[in-house]
Image (cartoon, rainbow, N blue to C red):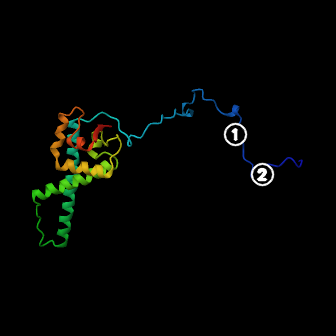
Amino acid sequence: MTPTESAPGPEAVPSAPPPSAVPTLDGRFPWHVAPPPRPATASARAHASGRPAGFVTRAAANAVDAALVSLVLALVYAMVAGFRFLLAPTSFRLVAPEFAWVVVAVGIGLAVYWTATWAGPGRTYGDELMALRVVGPGGGRLHFLHAAARAVLCVLFLPGLFWVLVSRRNRSVQDVVLRTAVVYD
């Protein structure tokens, strides 16, 4: 060996095989073919560009949400009653809540649930079931305060949803006041 030549040592990095050694993709082995890259699209969570949702799908989504919140509240009530029974089984009496308290609890539960889901993912479980999304004035997600205002308006003025039936752009009273929209995803 001459001083200019060096012996291959552990530091040597193998080079890539020559192009003739790489198998050609001639169709005989389709699992060797890489799928074409997906085109870059904007996130559906950031902007939904569907057409405005109608009355029936919005009402169905709201009914699913109300049923879900009512079920959660009933489970919480059953857990509290069960805990009270465990504390004093001999003197336990199951007390039915008054209807007015149930309405207030469901209203508060819906307002909290709608605020959290509209400000976060932009859709509730009912909206997801019906393939809907609530979007803000620019077509993006709602800010937390915007979502809270919309949720409170939806709870306090439930008949505002009927404005969808006469609106050309399928907007409820809450949508008109807050410049929001409910669109198909």
Q: Give the x, y percent position of residue 119.
A: 32, 50
Residue labelled with disc 2: 9
Tell me if 21 is positioned left or right of 154 in this view: right
- Residue 127 or 81: which is nearer the viewer? 127
Circle 2: element type: loop
Q: 101 above or below 114?
A: below
Tell me if 97 is positioned left or right of 153 in this view: left
Q: Give the x, y percent position of residue 150.
A: 25, 48
Residue type at numbered disc 1: Ala
Report if residue 144 is visible in the image: yes
Circle 1: element type: loop
Q: Earlier in the sequence, mark 2 or mark 1?
A: 2
Quarter holding residue 182: top left
Q: Quadrant of the C terminus?
A: top left
Quarter holding residue 98: bottom left
Residue labelled with disc 1: 16
